[in-house]
Image: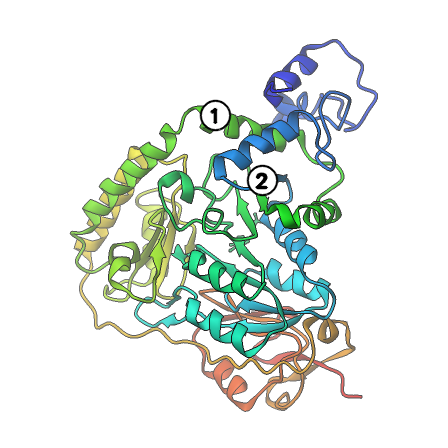
């Protein structure tokens, strides 16, 4: 039972067996996939079943639960997206009220739509100095729960895309005192507990924690894990079966199993990564114009904690745009960043990084910093939000809709999402009323706005007037 999945797949691949089962390539694929096709099988006897694990997958998931300290761990091959959809569907009944951090990922909004939930938003503080959101404040959670006894779930993201961690321990304590479970989207924080960060959501007591294994750990794209408390196990495992593909890839599962078994014996990759980051941040103390947000994180009370594996380079004090920084890093230094926004660029590190990549990055940033001049710092602009839902997300999306000119949309109920980048937050969601202030903000905004219809700032989808 305890054999690694890879040794089972290897012996099957080496066996002279005629494969009269899916997938259709039968282990013989075209060049790109040829080397691994022999390991790409379906759920044949001896290989367990992700939807009803009893063998090699169950033993691997038990090992993962032990490593993270959770009651139950479930492997996902459809990304954190699948865990978020399943976790929310498992905890929210149709029409129930959910308290949601406004800066959540798209998958959270999609799940709330599927559940027909009523949504109450909570806003993290916007930090004008950096142009990103800070941590969700426990006091704001307490206030919301005190004012509304019908909240059935709290959903928040920690760490955020930019590395901002919230005080999940205090939030869980408050939520649980009101009998309310907490779901944490920790897609960007699967590594936290192994890096000695005490503010990780599993140990802080969250009821459901969803982590991408591909964002910061050495696992392939689409792999993720969902940690579920014993109390929610039955409902969550049913919903995972609803959202997870019925043909999970053994290549992805084997890569997860191999990684989990590796770190259960040897955590040195985390120590190497930590050491490389510490050296990198030491070098970054000397920058004069570029600013690494992580360097200043301890001084900012809007950050409860900060994940320094995220390297967010602010250009607010330097006479270079984020786009130019992006181009110089790519073209001159052959460093490919994760994302460039208006005020900062984001470089992500992971277990695959070591001294070499981080010292090359620090040398490049020091050189670029020297070549820059100082510029006057400007506070970043925030969008004004109003939580004025008239219809639930679900009702607004299901209703008939019309595309109207923004100038004629005031007072109408919005039927689509409009996202502002960065930091990637919906400035309006289906069901909210379009106000004069919203239209003015869209017209004056320098942020990149994206809507489902692709027509913003000219037109917007609204619910048809009956
Ligand atoms: C905060 C956050 N949550 C969830 C997701 C979805 O994760 P996945 O791509 O593993 O489905 C993302 C993806 O970028 C994300 O940034």
Q: Secondary structure at mark 1?
A: helix
Tell me the residue at 59%/80% (across/down): 458
Up-down relation of residue 307 to residue 115 (above or below): above
* Quarter in which the N terminus is drawn: top right
Up-down relation of residue 275 to residue 171 (above or below): above
* Corner quadrant of residue 251: top right
Q: Is residue 147 visible?
A: yes
State the residue lying farthest toward the right. 20
Q: Secondary structure at mark 2?
A: loop
Does residue 168 appear left or right of residue 64 in this picture? Answer: left
Q: Nearer the viewer, residue 432 or 58?
A: 58
Tell me the residue at 36%/40% (across/down): 195
Write down the residue under mark 1. 262
Write down the residue under mark 2. 223
Tell me the residue at 28%/58% (across/down): 297
Q: Is residue 219 visible?
A: no
Up-down relation of residue 1 to residue 304 (above or below): above
Does residue 13 appear left or right of residue 340 in this picture? Answer: right
* Quarter in which the C terminus is drawn: bottom right
Q: Is mark 2 within 8 Å of ligand 1?
A: yes
Does residue 386 appear left or right of residue 40 in this picture? Answer: left
What crowding class fits label 1: few (fewer than 14 Cα within 10 Å), some (14-19), or many (20 or more)?
A: few
For the residues marked 1 and 2, what is the alpha-carbon distance in whole angstroms?
16 Å
State the residue lying farthest toward the top. 16
Q: Nearer the viewer, residue 298 or 372?
A: 298
* Corner quadrant of residue 13: top right
């Amino acid at each position: 039972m305890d054999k690694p999945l890879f040794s089972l797949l290897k012996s099957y691949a080496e066996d002279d067996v005629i494969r009269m089962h899916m997938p259709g390539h039968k282990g013989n694929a075209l060049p790109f996939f040829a080397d691994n096709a022999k390991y790409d099988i379906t759920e044949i006897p001896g290989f367990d079943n992700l939807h009803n694990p009893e063998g090699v997958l169950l033993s691997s998931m038990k090992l993962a639960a032990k490593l993270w300290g959770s009651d139950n761990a479930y492997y996902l091959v459809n990304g954190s997206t699948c865990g978020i959809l399943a976790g929310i569907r498992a905890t929210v009944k149709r029409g129930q009220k959910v308290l949601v951090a406004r800066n959540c990922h798209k998958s959270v909004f999609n799940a709330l739509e599927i559940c027909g939930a009523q949504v109450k938003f909570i806003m993290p503080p916007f930090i004008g100095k950096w142009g990103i959101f800070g941590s969700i404040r426990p006091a704001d959670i307490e206030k919301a729960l005190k004012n509304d006894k019908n909240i059935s779930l709290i959903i928040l993201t920690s760490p955020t895309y930019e590395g901002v961690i919230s005080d999940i321990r205090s939030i869980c304590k408050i939520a649980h005192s009101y009998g309310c479970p907490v779901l944490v989207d920790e897609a960007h924080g699967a590594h936290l507990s192994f890096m000695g960060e005490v503010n990780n959501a599993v140990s802080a007591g969250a009821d459901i924690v969803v982590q991408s294994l591909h964002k910061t750990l050495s696992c392939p794209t689409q792999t993720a894990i969902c940690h579920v408390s014993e109390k929610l196990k039955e409902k969550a495992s049913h919903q995972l079966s609803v959202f997870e593909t019925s043909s999970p890839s053994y290549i992805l599962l084997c890569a997860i199993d191999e990684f989990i078994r590796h770190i259960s014996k040897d955590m040195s990759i985390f120590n190497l990564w930590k050491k490389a980051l510490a050296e990198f941040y030491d070098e970054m103390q000397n920058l004069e114009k570029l600013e690494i947000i992580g360097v200043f994180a301890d001084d900012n009370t809007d950050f409860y904690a900060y994940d320094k594996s995220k390297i967010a380079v602010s250009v607010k004090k330097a006479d270079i745009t984020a786009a130019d920084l992006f181009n110089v890093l790519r073209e001159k230094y052959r460093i490919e960043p994760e994302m460039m926004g208006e005020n900062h660029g984001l470089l992500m590190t992971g277990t695959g990084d070591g001294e070499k990549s981080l010292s090359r990055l620090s040398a490049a940033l020091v050189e670029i910093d020297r070549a820059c001049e100082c510029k006057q710092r400007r506070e970043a602009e925030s969008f004004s939000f109003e939580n004025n839902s008239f219809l639930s997300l679900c009702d607004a999306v299901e209703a008939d809709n019309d595309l109207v000119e923004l100038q004629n949309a005031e007072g109408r109920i919005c039927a689509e999402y409009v996202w502002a980048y960065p930091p990637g937050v919906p400035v309006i969601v289906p069901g909210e009323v379009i106000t004069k202030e919203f239209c003015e903000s869209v017209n004056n905004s320098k942020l990149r706005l994206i809507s489902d219809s692709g027509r913003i700032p000219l037109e917007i989808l609204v619910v048809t007037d009956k």
